[in-house]
């Protein structure tokens, strides 16, 4: 007999909480986190992507480094036709179970940015498509588009909630918790969405190369993988991602 949406929700939350609790217990007994360095440095990402040419790389200020604590990072500005596009990638060779990388959803307001629309976008990747976050933001009349996602050697995840679940699973099963947050920001122009999607598609491949990944990544859990009911629940859009 099929589950109703309410029952699916309850089952998903029970599974999630049990998984997170188990990971925290495991973390307190034995360290299963195994650092995984990048195969190639982030600054090896292409200097010319679809006509967007590298202008400069930036250093994070000390207070940002203390807050983020990345293993390595890339902050780069590209330019094309008088428009700029900014890339930010923070990589973590290992993460703690029950934690997640800093979400722009929480960091942007502190920098004076207002999120006036939360959306998502499908990005062509590896012969298929992956869903990422797409935010419309503004600050003092300046409007920007932001695309971001969580990328590891094996998958791409948009939803922070799902990223925590998968991190807990990885801690328990393999100890491999390396991952990154990838973010693109560009002007909110009539061409901005198409430019952002196309650039994101290429950037996903560049980050895969840095991870040493030559094969396709999956969007979260593979179909029929661990806890398939929960994965389909999230995949169907009932996780709160719009």
Image: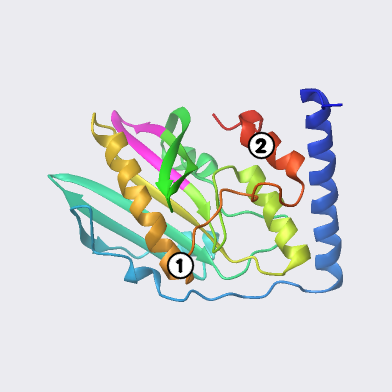
In the drawing, does residue 67 fall left or right of residue 140? right
What is the x, y in percent for residue 98?
73, 55
- Residue at the location (84% across, 53% down)? 21
Q: Which of the labelled discs sits on residue 138, or is there none?
A: none
In the drawing, does residue 76 fall left or right of residue 39? left
The secondary structure making up most of the magenta span is: strand
- Residue at the location (80% across, 38% down)? 13
- Residue at the location (70% across, 34% down)? 233
Q: Which of the labelled discs sits on residue 234, or is there none?
A: 2
Which quadrant does the N terminus fall into? top right
Q: Quadrant of residue 191?
A: top left
What is the x, y in percent for residue 219?
56, 48
Residue 17 appears in view:
yes
Give 142 or 192, whichever is nearer the viewer: 192
Give 179 or 88, whichever is nearer the viewer: 179
What is the x, y in percent for residue 44?
33, 71
In the drawing, does residue 50 fall left or right of residue 241? left
Q: Which of the labelled discs sits on residue 214, or is there none?
A: 1
* C-alpha gap between disc 2 and disc 1: 27 Å
- Residue at the location (85% across, 49% down)? 18
Which contiguous range is marked in magenta?
136-148
Q: Secondary structure at mark 2?
A: helix
Q: Quadrant of residue 43?
A: bottom left
What is the x, y in percent for residue 209?
42, 68
Q: Earlier in the sequence, mark 2 or mark 1?
A: 1
- Residue 41 located within the stretch drawn in magenta: no
Give 112 or 208, whichever is nearer the viewer: 208
Q: Secondary structure at mark 1?
A: loop
């Amino acid at each position: 007999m099929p589950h109703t949406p309410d029952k699916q929700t309850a089952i998903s939350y029970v599974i999630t909480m049990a998984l997170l609790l188990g990971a925290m217990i495991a973390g307190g007994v034995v360290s299963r986190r195994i650092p995984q360095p990048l195969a190639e440095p982030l600054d090896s990402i292409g200097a010319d992507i679809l006509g967007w040419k590298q202008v400069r790389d930036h250093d994070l200020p000390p207070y940002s480094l203390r807050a983020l604590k990345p293993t390595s990072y890339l902050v780069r500005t590209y330019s094309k036709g008088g428009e700029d596009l900014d890339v930010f990638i923070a990589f973590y060779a290992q993460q703690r179970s029950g934690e997640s990388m800093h979400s722009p959803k929480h960091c942007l307001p502190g920098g004076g940015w207002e999120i006036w629309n939360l959306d998502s976008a499908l990005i062509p990747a590896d012969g298929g498509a992956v869903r990422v976050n797409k935010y419309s933001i503004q600050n003092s009349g300046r409007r920007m588009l932001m695309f971001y996602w969580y990328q590891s050697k094996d998958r791409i995840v948009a939803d922070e909630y799902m990223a925590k679940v998968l991190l807990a699973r990885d801690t328990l099963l393999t100890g491999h918790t390396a991952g990154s947050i990838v973010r693109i920001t560009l002007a909110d122009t009539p061409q901005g969405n198409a430019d952002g999607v196309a650039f994101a598609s290429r950037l996903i491949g560049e980050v895969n190369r840095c991870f040493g990944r030559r094969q396709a990544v999956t969007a979260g859990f593979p179909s029929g993988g661990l806890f398939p009911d929960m994965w389909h629940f999230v995949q169907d859009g009932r996780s709160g991602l719009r």
